[in-house]
Image: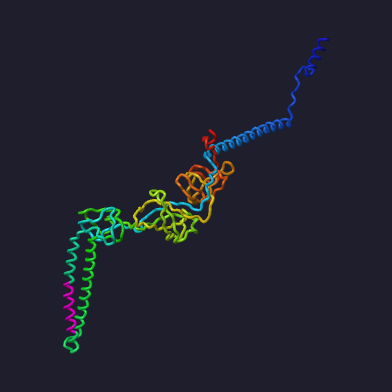
């Protein structure tokens, strides 16, 4: 009895039924399951969002780093203050007042030449002689043809005059008279044609002798005795230049174009005459600005009767500026030549390139004077890369400590 009671008591203590069977399991409610799914989805969304944000941040950092590494390294310095100037110097090309190649006007063989390179000759001086035997024979034939034509014309004229007199007395018919009159006119025209042919051949024969067309110097001789000479521009015989007066051409910047006057005296210097100044006269300008270089072409005539200066040389042309202009001196390598004109690259906002148009004054080859476009505090890029563009980021280096882009 006590044993059965204990057994029942033990079964009841384990949550079973009194008959000893196991208790039924209670199912999980639907609300709890949905909450679990939402929680899992929320965690997944948070993780995905965090991953996207992280990737965007990493891409932004990478792009910024790439841009920094791609920025060209440049050295930028403030320009040196130049002394204010009331004049400026430009290069000038020296040319002969008259420059002419000498060609043959008739064909033949060169029999003799009289002047060589460097000879100074007067206008009309005999330079060379050309033998033209075929032309001589053609002229002789033409002269004989002219004699024949003149004889025929005289006979026809006499016949026409005779018949013109007889027709008045009705001794000859008017038809025959008209025939002889027309024949006389035709033979007269034939004479004129023969005369023109003779004149043409005589003109060609006169070109057997080559004469100097002006006072000047023979700068080249390209032929020699016995050479076959062809008429035309196929082969130059001589080259002559008139050097008593020289033309000096210079390109004047547009900013000064309104200040040049015809007749003004211009000083010129030459490297071969150090410390000496020559004076020329501004005689003409192109009266138009070159749209590419934005300059005005001017011509200065220079007296060279002493023969000291040579065509083809380089002159330094000294122009007067309208007033004192403050200048800045920069290296010539800093200049940028683009279609829009001459420019300099300056650094703005700490790391951005800005291209400014400038006007130059004196140029000694190594440095140039900037008369317009720069300010005293500008940071001028000293040796800009060819690919430099407006607004491009640059890596500014210290002039004394040049490193690669990015600080490497």
Q: Is residue 239 above or below residue 82?
A: below
Of 39 and 33, the residue lying toward us: 39
Percent from the top left, x then y, of residue 15? 78, 19
- Residue furthest to the front: 275
Residue range in magenta is 147-163
SS majority, magenta: helix
In the rendered structure, does residue 11 fall within the stretch colored magenta?
Answer: no
Q: Is residue 1 left or right of residue 79?
A: right
- Residue furthest to the bottom: 169
Percent from the top left, x then y, of residue 328? 53, 47
Quarter of the rendering containing residue 64:
top right
Percent from the top left, x then y, of residue 272? 38, 48
Of 392 and 75, the residue lying toward us: 75
Report the label total. 0
Of 307 and 403, the residue lying toward us: 307
Percent from the top left, x then y, of residue 95? 37, 55
Quarter of the rendering containing residue 53:
top right
Q: Is residue 302 left or right of residue 116?
A: right
| Residue at (53% x, 55% y) in the render | 323
């Amino acid at each position: 009895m006590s044993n059965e009671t204990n057994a029942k008591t033990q079964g009841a203590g384990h949550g079973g039924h009194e008959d000893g069977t196991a208790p039924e399991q209670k199912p999980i409610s639907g609300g709890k399951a949905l909450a679990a799914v939402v929680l899992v989805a929320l965690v997944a969304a948070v993780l995905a969002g965090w991953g996207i944000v992280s990737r965007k941040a990493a891409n932004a950092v990478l792009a910024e780093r790439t841009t920094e590494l791609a920025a060209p390294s440049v050295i930028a310095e403030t320009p040196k203050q130049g002394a204010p100037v009331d004049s400026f110097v430009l290069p000038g090309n020296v040319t002969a007042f008259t420059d002419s190649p000498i060609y043959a006007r008739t064909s033949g063989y060169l029999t003799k030449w009289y002047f060589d390179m460097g000879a100074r000759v007067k206008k009309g001086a005999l330079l060379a002689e050309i033998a033209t035997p075929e032309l001589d024979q053609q002229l002789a034939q033409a002269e004989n043809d002219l004699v024949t034509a003149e004889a025929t014309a005289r006979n026809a004229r006499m016949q026409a005059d005779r018949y013109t007199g007889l027709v008045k007395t009705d001794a000859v018919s008017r038809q025959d008279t008209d025939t002889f009159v027309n024949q006389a006119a035709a033979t007269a025209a034939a004479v004129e044609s023969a005369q023109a042919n003779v004149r043409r051949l005589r003109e060609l024969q006169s070109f057997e002798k080559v004469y100097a067309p002006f006072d000047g110097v023979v700068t080249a001789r390209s032929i020699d005795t016995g050479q076959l000479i062809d008429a035309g521009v196929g082969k130059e015989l001589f080259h002559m230049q008139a050097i008593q007066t020289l033309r000096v051409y210079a390109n004047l910047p547009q900013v000064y174009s309104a200040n040049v006057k015809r007749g003004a005296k211009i000083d010129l210097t030459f490297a071969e005459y150090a410390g000496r100044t020559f004076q020329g006269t501004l005689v003409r300008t192109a009266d138009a600005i070159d749209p590419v270089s934005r300059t005005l072409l001017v011509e200065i005539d220079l007296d060279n009767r002493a023969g000291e200066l040579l065509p083809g040389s380089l002159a330094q042309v000294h122009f007067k500026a309208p007033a004192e202009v403050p200048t800045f001196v920069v290296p010539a390598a800093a200049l940028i030549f683009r279609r829009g004109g001459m420019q300099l690259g300056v650094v703005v906002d700490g790391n951005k390139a800005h291209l400014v148009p400038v006007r130059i004054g004196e140029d000694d080859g190594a440095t140039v004077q900037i008369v317009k476009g720069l300010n005293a505090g500008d940071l001028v890029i000293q040796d800009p890369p060819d690919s430099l563009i407006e607004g491009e980021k640059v890596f500014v280096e210290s002039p004394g400590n040049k490193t690669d882009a990015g600080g490497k």
